[in-house]
Protein backbone atom coordinates (compact mmCIF):
# COMPACT_ATOMS: atom_id res chain seq x y z
CA UNK A 1 0.00 0.00 0.00
CA UNK A 2 1.20 3.46 -0.76
CA UNK A 3 1.53 6.31 1.70
CA UNK A 4 -1.55 8.01 0.23
CA UNK A 5 -3.79 4.99 0.76
CA UNK A 6 -2.63 4.67 4.41
CA UNK A 7 -3.50 8.28 5.07
CA UNK A 8 -6.92 7.80 3.44
CA UNK A 9 -7.59 4.79 5.63
CA UNK A 10 -6.57 6.73 8.73
CA UNK A 11 -8.92 9.59 7.76
CA UNK A 12 -11.85 7.19 7.35
CA UNK A 13 -11.23 5.61 10.75
CA UNK A 14 -10.82 9.05 12.39
CA UNK A 15 -14.00 10.31 10.74
CA UNK A 16 -15.93 7.27 11.98
CA UNK A 17 -14.85 7.97 15.56
CA UNK A 18 -15.57 11.64 15.32
CA UNK A 19 -18.89 11.67 17.20
CA UNK A 20 -17.37 9.71 20.10
CA UNK A 21 -14.64 12.35 20.57
CA UNK A 22 -17.03 15.26 20.06
CA UNK A 23 -18.98 14.56 23.27
CA UNK A 24 -18.48 16.69 26.31
CA UNK A 25 -16.79 15.05 29.27
CA UNK A 26 -19.24 13.57 31.79
CA UNK A 27 -22.05 13.24 29.25
CA UNK A 28 -23.54 9.81 28.80
CA UNK A 29 -22.80 8.12 25.49
CA UNK A 30 -25.74 7.71 23.11
CA UNK A 31 -27.45 4.34 23.35
CA UNK A 32 -26.00 1.86 20.90
CA UNK A 33 -28.32 -0.04 18.64
CA UNK A 34 -28.74 -3.60 19.86
CA UNK A 35 -27.38 -6.14 17.42
CA UNK A 36 -29.97 -8.34 15.84
CA UNK A 37 -30.15 -11.61 17.74
CA UNK A 38 -29.45 -14.62 15.61
CA UNK A 39 -32.08 -17.32 15.94
CA UNK A 40 -30.90 -20.06 18.33
CA UNK A 41 -31.31 -23.67 17.20
CA UNK A 42 -33.84 -25.58 19.27
CA UNK A 43 -32.18 -28.01 21.73
CA UNK A 44 -33.65 -31.49 21.88
CA UNK A 45 -35.46 -32.12 25.13
CA UNK A 46 -35.00 -35.54 26.76
CA UNK A 47 -38.00 -37.76 26.83
CA UNK A 48 -39.36 -38.32 30.35
CA UNK A 49 -40.11 -41.94 29.43
CA UNK A 50 -36.52 -42.97 28.55
CA UNK A 51 -35.60 -46.52 29.63
CA UNK A 52 -32.28 -48.32 29.38
CA UNK A 53 -32.48 -51.77 27.80
CA UNK A 54 -29.43 -53.88 28.65
CA UNK A 55 -30.19 -56.68 26.17
CA UNK A 56 -27.75 -59.03 27.89
CA UNK A 57 -25.01 -56.43 28.47
CA UNK A 58 -23.79 -55.49 31.93
CA UNK A 59 -25.01 -52.27 33.51
CA UNK A 60 -22.29 -49.64 32.89
CA UNK A 61 -23.16 -47.80 36.12
CA UNK A 62 -22.39 -50.72 38.45
CA UNK A 63 -18.84 -50.81 39.79
CA UNK A 64 -16.66 -53.70 38.67
CA UNK A 65 -14.67 -53.47 41.90
CA UNK A 66 -17.49 -54.72 44.14
CA UNK A 67 -18.96 -57.53 42.13
CA UNK A 68 -20.43 -60.85 43.07
CA UNK A 69 -22.57 -61.30 46.15
CA UNK A 70 -22.12 -57.66 47.30
CA UNK A 71 -23.31 -56.25 43.96
CA UNK A 72 -26.26 -58.62 43.51
CA UNK A 73 -27.91 -57.73 46.80
CA UNK A 74 -27.16 -54.01 46.85
CA UNK A 75 -27.97 -51.71 49.73
CA UNK A 76 -31.76 -51.93 49.54
CA UNK A 77 -31.83 -55.71 49.92
CA UNK A 78 -30.17 -55.47 53.33
CA UNK A 79 -33.42 -54.03 54.73
CA UNK A 80 -35.37 -57.07 53.47
CA UNK A 81 -32.88 -59.61 54.87
CA UNK A 82 -34.59 -62.30 56.94
CA UNK A 83 -34.03 -62.39 60.67
CA UNK A 84 -32.23 -65.16 62.54
CA UNK A 85 -29.79 -67.62 61.01
CA UNK A 86 -31.44 -67.20 57.59
CA UNK A 87 -30.05 -63.65 57.46
CA UNK A 88 -26.40 -64.64 58.03
CA UNK A 89 -23.88 -64.32 55.21
CA UNK A 90 -21.30 -67.04 54.69
CA UNK A 91 -18.37 -64.60 54.60
CA UNK A 92 -19.30 -63.04 57.96
CA UNK A 93 -20.17 -66.31 59.70
CA UNK A 94 -17.94 -67.45 62.59
CA UNK A 95 -18.24 -70.85 64.27
CA UNK A 96 -18.43 -70.39 68.07
CA UNK A 97 -19.10 -73.97 69.06
CA UNK A 98 -20.09 -77.44 67.85
CA UNK A 99 -22.07 -79.97 69.92
CA UNK A 100 -23.66 -83.38 69.52
CA UNK A 101 -27.36 -83.48 70.44
CA UNK A 102 -29.50 -86.62 70.05
CA UNK A 103 -27.10 -88.09 67.53
CA UNK A 104 -26.87 -85.01 65.24
CA UNK A 105 -24.27 -82.28 65.13
CA UNK A 106 -25.34 -78.72 65.89
CA UNK A 107 -23.23 -75.62 65.46
CA UNK A 108 -23.37 -72.32 67.30
CA UNK A 109 -22.54 -69.61 64.75
CA UNK A 110 -22.30 -65.83 65.02
CA UNK A 111 -22.79 -63.17 62.39
CA UNK A 112 -21.16 -59.79 61.90
CA UNK A 113 -23.38 -58.26 64.60
CA UNK A 114 -22.20 -60.82 67.19
CA UNK A 115 -25.57 -62.54 67.68
CA UNK A 116 -25.23 -66.31 68.10
CA UNK A 117 -27.59 -68.81 66.46
CA UNK A 118 -27.82 -72.60 66.56
CA UNK A 119 -27.89 -74.27 63.13
CA UNK A 120 -28.02 -77.84 61.83
CA UNK A 121 -27.48 -79.52 58.46
CA UNK A 122 -29.97 -78.30 55.86
CA UNK A 123 -30.56 -74.89 57.44
CA UNK A 124 -30.62 -72.03 54.96
CA UNK A 125 -28.40 -68.98 55.20
CA UNK A 126 -28.74 -65.72 53.30
CA UNK A 127 -26.37 -66.85 50.55
CA UNK A 128 -26.17 -70.61 51.02
CA UNK A 129 -27.13 -73.78 52.87
CA UNK A 130 -25.44 -75.63 55.73
CA UNK A 131 -24.36 -78.86 54.03
CA UNK A 132 -22.79 -80.82 56.90
CA UNK A 133 -21.49 -80.31 60.42
CA UNK A 134 -18.64 -82.38 61.85
CA UNK A 135 -16.79 -82.18 65.17
CA UNK A 136 -14.19 -79.84 63.65
CA UNK A 137 -16.03 -77.75 61.03
CA UNK A 138 -19.20 -76.52 59.37
CA UNK A 139 -19.45 -77.07 55.60
CA UNK A 140 -21.55 -74.50 53.73
CA UNK A 141 -22.64 -74.66 50.09
CA UNK A 142 -22.51 -70.98 49.13
CA UNK A 143 -24.32 -69.57 46.10
CA UNK A 144 -21.98 -67.52 43.89
CA UNK A 145 -23.75 -64.49 42.41
CA UNK A 146 -20.82 -63.34 40.28
CA UNK A 147 -21.90 -63.23 36.60
CA UNK A 148 -18.28 -63.65 35.50
CA UNK A 149 -17.78 -66.84 37.51
CA UNK A 150 -18.22 -70.20 35.80
CA UNK A 151 -19.23 -71.98 38.99
CA UNK A 152 -22.54 -71.05 40.59
CA UNK A 153 -21.90 -72.75 43.96
CA UNK A 154 -18.81 -73.28 46.07
CA UNK A 155 -18.07 -75.22 49.20
CA UNK A 156 -16.84 -73.18 52.17
CA UNK A 157 -15.50 -74.89 55.29
CA UNK A 158 -15.56 -72.88 58.51
CA UNK A 159 -13.42 -74.45 61.22
CA UNK A 160 -14.19 -74.41 64.94
CA UNK A 161 -10.62 -73.37 65.81
CA UNK A 162 -10.74 -70.47 63.34
CA UNK A 163 -9.98 -70.12 59.66
CA UNK A 164 -11.83 -71.15 56.57
CA UNK A 165 -11.21 -73.15 53.43
CA UNK A 166 -12.88 -72.59 50.07
CA UNK A 167 -13.14 -75.38 47.50
Image: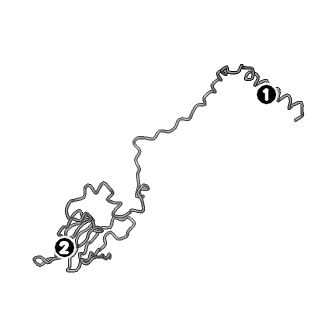
Q: How is the image coloured?
A: one colour
* Between discs 2 and 1, the one toward the N terminus: 1
Relative placement, left or right, of 143 versus 19 is: left
Q: Position of residue 41 (x, y in %)?
A: 56, 35
Q: Position of residue 140 (x, y in %)?
A: 25, 72
**Which of the numbered marks, if any, corresponds to residue 13?**
1
Q: At 25% across and 71% down in the image, what residue appears?
A: 94
Q: Residue furthest left?
A: 102
Label 2 sits on a secondary structure element that is: strand
Q: Position of residue 63 (x, y in %)?
A: 42, 59
Above or below for 39 versus 141? above
Residue placed most toward the observer, 43 or 56:
43
Query: Image quarter for residue 111?
Result: bottom left
- Structural crowding at the residue carrying mark 2, measured as other residues with C-alpha within 10 Å and reported as few (<14), some (14–19) or many (≥20): many
Query: Image quarter for residue 75?
Result: bottom left
**Disc 2 vs disc 1: Cβ atoms closer than 8 Å?**
no
Distance (Cα) linking label 2 and label 1:
99 Å
Q: At 79% across and 23% down in the image, what residue appears?
A: 15
**Total number of numbered discs in the rendering:** 2
Q: At 16% across and 74% down in the image, what residue appears?
A: 106
Label 1 sits on a secondary structure element that is: helix
- Structural crowding at the residue carrying mark 1, measured as other residues with C-alpha within 10 Å and reported as few (<14), some (14–19) or many (≥20): few
Above or below for 134 versus 111? below
Q: Residue furthest bottom?
A: 135
Quadrant where the C terminus sits is bottom left
Above or below for 112 versus 40? below
Q: At 53% across and 35% down in the image, what residue appears?
A: 42
Q: Residue furthest front?
A: 26
Quadrant where the N terminus sits is top right
Q: Which residue is mark 2?
A: 107
Relative placement, left or right, of 4 versus 98 is: right
Amino acid sequence: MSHASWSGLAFILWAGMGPAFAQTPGAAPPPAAAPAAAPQPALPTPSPNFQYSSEGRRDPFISLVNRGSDMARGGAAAATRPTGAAGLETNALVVRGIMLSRGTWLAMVAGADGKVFTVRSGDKLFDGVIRTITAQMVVILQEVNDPLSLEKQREVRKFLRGGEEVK
